[in-house]
Image (cartoon, helix red, strand yellow):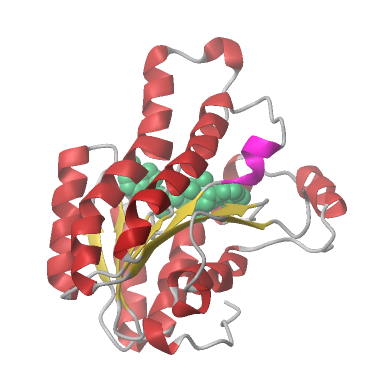
Amino acid sequence: MTAVSVRHTDLANRGVLITGGGSGIGAALVEGFAAQGAKVAFLDIAEQQSRKLAGRLSEKSAHPVVYLKADLRNVAETQAAVDEVAGKLGSLAVLVNNAGWDDRHELDAVTEEYWDASQAINLKQMFFVSQAAVPHIRKTGAGAIVNFSSIAYLLNMGEMPAYTTAKAGIIGLTKSLAGRLGAENIRVNAILPGMIVTERQKELWLTEEGIGKMVARQCLKRVLMAEDLVGPCLFLASNASAAMTAQTIVIDGGAL
Ligand SMILES: NC(=O)c1ccc[n+]([C@@H]2O[C@H](COP(=O)([O-])OP(=O)(O)OC[C@H]3O[C@@H](n4cnc5c(N)ncnc54)[C@H](O)[C@@H]3O)[C@@H](O)[C@H]2O)c1
């Protein structure tokens, strides 16, 4: 991966929890925070790849990288996992709500069950993970939450209405949490990635033609990778953005 050249010294030894850290953008974030000397933990449902990642990074990081298996759709299980993470790390100052599931779905095929399942992983869990993390972040006296939304909800994309509704909802959640938590010195911001070429995206959705079209639309004429989200996320989590809250930043190579 491309290492971030900026060192955020305030992130060293800070407790950081990343959801969905086992693969894709989340895995790049886990590696990026660990490289800053932070105490990193991540939750993910996919056990095998997550254990592998935690093992690989623990060997080369200042602190062991903690992985806990959790299904974020299960609120009670998630709350218990957040408390366990805070205990294992010793403290928690940063939460990165990265996990999501961008399944494509036809308007006519969406059932009530499908809709609820999509909101459960793409929106509802972000509220409950935040709710569980805030009491721990409070104890550190200051902290940051970074929520992953998407530019997808701004592009009038017709093939994933449940996903884009959730991603738009994340902006409301971000601003609401920022309003509630600002007085406690906890900042809440959102990142809207553009088309990020991960292994899962390549396997399921992306074609060479689709990638080419998006790159042509972007100002920057290159494919964006998971590592491109690391610098912006470190910035929002660190004191470099100390006066910034309730904002969204777009990392899309200039597609919008
Ligand atoms: N890749 C893109 O092009 C792109 C674009 C815009 C926004 N985003 C957003 O960025 C974030 C990360 O994207 P990504 O492409 O790396 O996602 P991904 O789907 O590749 O990875 C998400 C991670 O979440 C985990 N996860 C899924 N369901 C879970 C559950 N129920 N409980 C616990 N963990 C679960 C997965 O195992 C995986 O490791 C997501 O919020 C996504 O919506 C991605």
Q: Position of residue 115 (x, y in %)?
A: 43, 21
User: In the rendered view, does 155 fall on the left or right side of 187?
Assistant: right
Query: Where on the picture, by quarter, is residue 22?
Result: bottom left
Residue drawn at 38 percent across, 54 percent down:
20
36 over 215 or under it: above or below: below
Q: Does the magenta stretch include residue 151?
A: yes
- Could you tell me if residue 55 is visible in this image? yes
- Main secondary-structure element of the magenta-colored stretch: helix
Residue nearest the observer in this picture, 243 or 198: 243
Q: Give the range drawn in magenta.
A: 150-154
Question: Which residue is pictured at 64% across the width and 55% down the height?
Answer: 196
Who's the residue at 48% across and 40% down the image? Answer: 172
Return the residue nearer the eye: 243 or 140: 243
- Whether residue 49 appears in this view of the structure is no
Q: Position of residue 193 (x, y in %)?
A: 61, 53
Q: Position of residue 221 (x, y in %)?
A: 84, 62
Q: As drawn, which residue projects farthest toward the front?
A: 183
Within the magenta stretch, is there residue 13? no
